[in-house]
Image: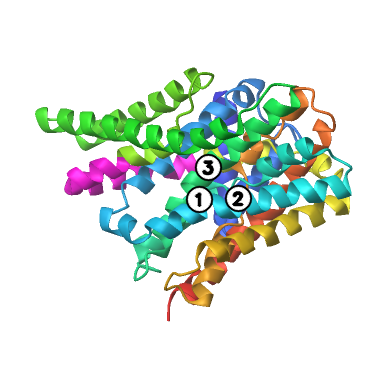
Amino acid sequence: MATSLAIITLFGLFSKKLFNRFKVPGLLGMILAGVLIGPYGFNLLSDEILIASEGFRKIALIVILLRAGLGIKREDLRKVGRPAINLSFIPGLFEGFTIAYVSMKFFAFSFIQGGILGFIIAAVSPAVIVPSMLDFMEKGIGKEKNIPTLILAGASIDDVFAITIFSAFMGMYGGGRVNIGATIFSIPLSIVLGVVSGGIIGIVLIKIFKSYDIRDTEKTLYILGSAILLTSFETMIKSKIDIAGLLGVMAIGFIIYEKMPKVGRRIASKFDKVWVFAEILLFVLVGAQVNVVLALDAGLKGVFLIFIGLIARSIGVLLSLVGTNLKMREKLFCIFAYIPKATVQAAIGAIPLSAGVESGDLILSLAVLSIIITAPLGAIAIKATGNKLLEG
């Protein structure tokens, strides 16, 4: 495993620097490096690192979400409240159900198969979006209308909706009775439980930090360890009740920054340093999950389906922002920011196949294809248009 970590680190760093030199987002280079050194490329990684891949990716995602929480102010959240809530579910619903319908026409899927596919693809990637929005926040880009905060808040909840509805369709396919009302109710309940859980952990940590003389580096480890335990607890009780663990992770950072702003800023700088390595792990290992040959099996119909879904998502974004004071160019940026898919699709794309869903191999192919198309497209669009559309 040590050799594989060295390979991941060196290839990831080199590819990131190379792509940045050509003004292309470094994460694309890291994903490509993962494809090349992964099991579907030159197969340079050990089985141990691939088995542990999900855990490493989760820890890396926790790092960047904690960093996001440590950069959000209460007054900024208050300003973006309603449109952030709209962005958390309207675009995903538009995309998910549109893909469900189109897949019935393109691939002769049943509505349930289409729903499974639609809500795998509908989840945006916080791993791609969060670092970009944090970068804009640090540079003060879009600060006047808190657009990066708006996107951060909406995107962090988007996955909760997508995964919950995906799980409901999986239950229906298995012949189980799915209570639609209970499913809908479980979404806000999951969000509330996640925020409350993270808030409680944050308050406990604050009491510890105020009671004992603890170095900032140790505080950072306390926070990271607590956040990992929260997501582990989420997994343990998932069969009984859903908790939006990743949202809870952001809440930990938010509470600490809110109650101890000076400490929060210092810890945020620590997480910036941790992210240097965590970012490489996250994107290289995401790339290692991508089977390009499998994606090609989806063919041109698959490409069209992905783009039709993105059009539906874009319409959902515009509807979510009706009544706001955002200019059209700022709304256009929000559309671009909501394009990238990666982490969720890599994590759950293979579930239908392993569960015996008919055409599960095609569903996996389309999930992989969505990563290949939208991660580069979204990352490039965000980087290329942020300064122009959010300033001036």
Residue under label 3: 280
Indicate yes or no whether the magenta region holds residue 170. Answer: no
The type of residue carrying mark 1 is Ser
Residue 8 location (% of width, % of height):
58, 37
Examine the rendered structure and indicate whether residue 91 appears above or below residue 293.
Answer: below
Residue under label 2: 92
Compute the Cα span from label 3 to label 2. Answer: 28 Å
Compute the Cα span from label 3 to label 1. Answer: 27 Å
Q: Secondary structure at mark 3?
A: helix
Residue 88, which numbered label? 1
Q: Secondary structure at mark 2?
A: helix
Apparent side of residue 155 relative to residue 309 in the rendered image (left or right): left
Residue 313, by quadrant, is: bottom right
Q: Nearer the viewer, residue 104 or 214?
A: 104
Q: Is residue 157 visible?
A: yes
Stretch in magenta: 253-279
